[in-house]
Image (cartoon, helix red, strand yellow):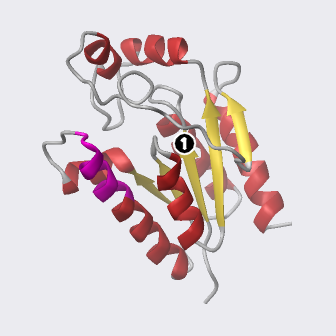
Amino acid sequence: MGEGWCVWVTGLPGSGKSVVAETLIKFLLQKGIRAQLLSSDALRKVLTPKPTYTLEERDIVYETLVYIAKLLTQNNVNVVIDATGNLRRYRDNARNQIQRFMEAYLECPLEICIERESKRAETRQAPRQIYTRALRGEAPTVPGVGQPYEPPINPEVTVNTAHCTPEQAAHKILEAILSKWYI
């Protein structure tokens, strides 16, 4: 059995990670390629049902996320990670442990992320109103506001989601996957 691949969709909260990752999974299926979606928000609900978002807690969540992705890829399961992974070291850890790895950076200005997050009805398991609470000082650990978000230095794919639809972003990532592992 061969190795699966892993694509980590990263970006600020509100940059479109969840909807782009879900759309990417659909596009892959249309090409006959199966992939497992791993969401840090879904994993966090199991690991830390009452999250505090401390650095220690984030370390545990992201180490577990990478561990699961590594096991899946070793068993020929393709993985799409939907996670902010605010510190570069989280994503570098995945790159170091997973043989076939790609980083897809959803670049989006903080102001647009804040505006989107305040208006969205469907949070896809993410906490609600995080920027509103962060700007009021009630949530000091939100990446981009109270905590740093370290963008990737050399991502395989960068998509500015302020200027494209989730479908366009997912299509660009799909093209990168196809050219790297299927052509």
Q: Is residue 52 visible?
A: yes
The residue segment tinted magenta is 53-62
Using residue 172 as the reference point, say whether residue 56 is left or right of it: left
Residue at point 47% right, 54% down?
90
Seen in the picture, residue 73 relative to 178 is either above or below; the reply is below
Seen in the picture, residue 107 relative to 5 is either above or below; the reply is above
Which residue is tagged 1?
10
Q: Could you tell me the amino acid type at mark 1?
A: Thr
Tell me if residue 54 is in the magenta stretch: yes
How many numbered discs? 1
Q: Residue furthest bottom?
A: 1
Mark 1 packing: few (<14 Cα in 10 Å), some, or many (20+)?
Answer: many
Residue at point 15% right, 47% down?
49
Tell me residue 160's x, y (percent). Answer: 69, 27
Q: Quadrant of the C terminus?
A: bottom right
Seen in the picture, residue 24 relative to 130 is either above or below; the reply is below
Q: Quadrant of the N terminus?
A: bottom right
Tell me if residue 99 is in the magenta stretch: no
Q: Main secondary structure of the magenta part?
A: helix
Residue at point 24% right, 50% down?
57
Using residue 49 as the reference point, say whether residue 5 is left or right of it: right
Residue at point 24% right, 14% down?
137
Seen in the picture, residue 167 relative to 46 is either above or below; the reply is above
Q: Residue furthest right?
A: 183
Q: Closest to the observer: 130 or 141? A: 141
Q: Quadrant of residue 145?
A: top left
Tell me residue 97's x, y (percent). Answer: 54, 72
